[in-house]
Image: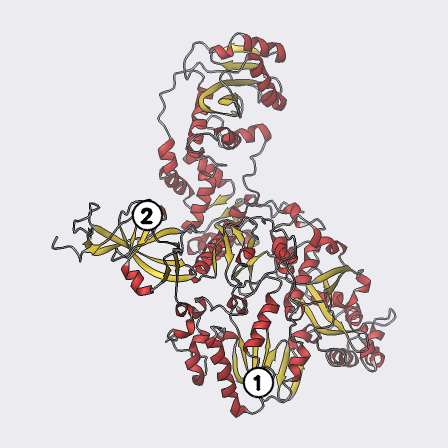
Amino acid sequence: MDNLDSVEFVSLALDSNKKPLLFINLYVQKFPAEPLKTLIDSGATLNFISPLIVEKYKIPKTQLKNPQVVRMLDGTISQTGCIWHQVHLTVLANGHTHSIPFLVCPIGNTPAILGMTWLMAEAPLIDWQQGLVTFPKQVQIASKEEADSDPLTDLPPQYHEFAKVFGKEEFKVLPPHREYDISIDLVPDAKLSPGPIYSMTNAESKALKQHIDEELATGKICPSTLSASAPVMFVKKADGSLRLVVDYRKLNDVTHKNVYPLPRQDNLMAKLRHAKVFTKLDLRWGYNNVWIKEGNEWKTAFRTKYGLFKYLVMPFGLTNAPAAFQHFMNNLFRDLIDVNVVIYLDNILIFSDKPEEHPKHVREVLSRLMRNQLFCKLSKCHFHVTTVDYLGIVISPAGFSMDQKKVEAVTSWPTPRTVKQVQAFLGFVNYLCCFIPNFSSVARPLHHLTRKETPWSWGKPEEDAFQELKTLVTKSPVLIHSNPELPYYLETDASGVAMGAILSQQGPDNRLHPIAYMSKLFSGAEANYDTHDKELLAIIKALEEWRIFLEATDKPTQVFTDHRNLEYWMQARTFNRRHAQWRIFLSNFNFEIHYCPGKQLGKPDALSRQLDYIDTPPKPEVMLPSEVFANTSEEELEIVTEICNKLRDNPSLEPIITFLTEDWEENLLWYRRKLVVPDLEPLKEQLLKEFHNSPLAGHPGQQRTLKLISRNYWWPGMKSSAKEWVECCPTCQANRRAHAPAIALKPLEVPPFPFHTISYNFITGFPKLQGSDAILVVIDSFSKFGHFIPTTKRISAKGLADLFVSHVWKLHGLPVRTISDRGTTFTGKFLRALYQRLGIKPAFSSAYHLELDGQTERVNQFIEFYLRSYVAADHLDWAMWLPLVEYAYNNAKHAATGKTPFELVYGRNPVMNPSNIPVLDMVT
């Protein structure tokens, strides 16, 4: 015992029938959401976890430097022996995060034990009568912790004491409860129904798992048991990262609306007229800094492939989130608002008339943020500036000016090169002519150029008129400031390669005045969308650009488009993946879509088509919705995308790429109509799994695996890769059986055509499933095509004849000749019934042996191997796998013919996944 570490004492009182026990649920970060029911035991000096739990969740262990022993209270050493390992877990307990070391030790039926070291470190408050464990408030207040010691070079030195406000890690601590915790009040008789679980790519699944782990660890979410949960999905942000979106549309529909007002932009600006210096702060994930009011958390439940969860803090997407957060911020800074602070949701602007007083004003705001555990995104903050962009308005001591982004669509309009392009520009500015003094006089050179009798000539008069009109259009009284109390009017249009939009409101003269213009090129992928999706994307891009105006409006924004189908889009029930993401985004806005014919919608139409000046020939547009083409396999599509991303950077392919310079299509490299795969093991492994391990492949041998992959993919050394993969496949090694040497058979003559000659027999011994306990195997001797039909070993002669007619005869007609063994099932009444119904002339084999009909017996071995590889442990699902067994068999190259049965019967191989078929030169 001399080499053992200090002895630990533990009291294992595990029989709940003998004495009451105190348990706490621990949610372990990075592992499944089911909690560990953990015993709190003051008789244990340390913390212990069962090795069964460690093994179940594959929790990584570390070996102790010195083994430890467990002594019981009577001084005897536990019979469990020495403890050699420990684990370190980050867990969530009652909304608080703890980092706890556990010794791995058998502890009966209890998953884990928390001992005195944990009790002394955490000092939990225990209600012994109720059996409840809570924690002191100071544990969750981040402001009482040490500030991050890392230097913040972008933060002015005079504010370094507030470094905590800008620390990323600090935001992971839960905010304190406040009187502003949001309540979600539902309308009477409201009912919530469960939403679907949207499919996700591997990358999205990993991001979802990581997000759930992080949110569980910080205590922002916790597991839920409510079935009426909202679905989730990811949308890509501008920087390419993924943002989780919860689809709370059903919840929002039955929620009482909070009428707390958001600030008017003109009122905010009025307070800044005399300001000389500004500091702008941007809160990090502002809404998450407000708790959900106790008892309301269940309403925020959401469902994922990893389980059900609910929010403890206010998430994005709740209909009352903007109003609740504005109410919280207004009350927090009530005495500073309009004195030296203006606030719009999570955008804080500190202003000072006297620059020498500005640091004092900034310090007061930062002090309140730190005391109330609110954190800022330093990269979006600006300190002590004289010009600042706030809510789309550029503010300076000289006054206000329009953000250039708002008018960039007009000011960057390229010089027209054709009469048609001049007409497009005039079509845009004509609707503003009533706001522009002397419009007709200024525009006369351009109007003159559009006359049929006028030859094309772009000179100084035309250029001066063009530039003057662009300047006049972007100045008041044309452009006006927004008024949140009035409805917004949004006009959008999409052309072949670009979109345009105008945001307007009624002015004092009751005419529509533009607030901002927008024009953007579609990305490469977006330019290939069908017309319907381009028009919808134009609306989405405009709402995204102007969400500061259009989100959380009381009055619905009136959206005008020249695509009639969009009027009914939000009522549609069937969506593809892209539409589902768009619909969730649009649920954040209050809007109505109206159809307006193209000729009446000339303004945004001109903005969208000004970018058509680029020398790109127009492509034919397809009016069919994208659902018609949504037939690609997500998993293999992701593989092809990864190939596309890695191909040009792979040094092993440089000689091949140089040789095949003309075979690049859509950033993919093709060799003999096969996609070239870069020398990256993860990519190769994904393809080998797809074409060997998947049920559609059925764990074929080396040659068949190679044949399946090489139909559509190629890389150097493919044969060796396939050989090594199959030889190392644990499923193949476990389920392949050695077969007795085949008995020499009398060669049968080759039939003249498919299903001229067939052979058939039974495989028996299966558990009974819906009346079936056997498989009828029917094989065509010409093509080796097979049908595998569930049946019963006690089937009657008439029943077997009916089965044959239903599954074989209806597809292939009458065989001229049949081959079977001479078992009792195939003799007597059955053969007579079959002969009478179909006119089949049986041809018996020469003797009765188990593997005499080698053709069907080899197929039987394939079927048995496949089922051993995929069926459940109780074998009760064997019949459900037969269609996939049949597909995998008929899709595999046969040694006797050198081709697949599919190819010989249908003249082609089937499509395993639509995305693996090279279609670039097949679409016309």
Residue 800 percent across, percent down from the top left: 56, 16
Q: Is residue 367 above or below residue 607?
A: below
Q: CA distance from mark 2 to mark 1?
A: 59 Å
Q: How is the image coloured?
A: secondary structure
SS for dot 2? loop
Residue drawn 46% across and 60% down? 215
Disc 2 target residue: 110
Q: Confirm whether residue 554 shows in the render.
A: yes
Total numbered labels: 2
Relative depth, front residue between 539 and 10 = 10
Residue 357 percent across, percent down from the top left: 52, 90
Farthest front residue in view: 129
SS for dot 1? loop
Considering only order in the chain, which callout, 1 or 2, is on the residue closer to the N terminus? 2
Q: Is residue 297 above or below residue 908?
A: below
**What amino acid is found at the position of numbered circle 1 in the picture?**
Asn
Q: Which mark is residue 340?
A: 1
Relative depth, front residue between 507 and 521 = 507
Task: Quadrant for residue 521, please give it.
Answer: bottom right
Task: Quadrant for residue 68, please give it.
Answer: bottom left
Residue 704 percent across, percent down from the top left: 45, 34
Relative depth, front residue between 190 and 719 = 190
Residue drawn 56% across and 72% down? 328
Task: Judge the density around disc 2: few (<14), some (14-19), many (≥20) Cα neighbours within 10 Å.
Answer: many
Q: Which mark is residue 666?
A: none
- Of tags 2 and 1, the one toward the viewer is 2
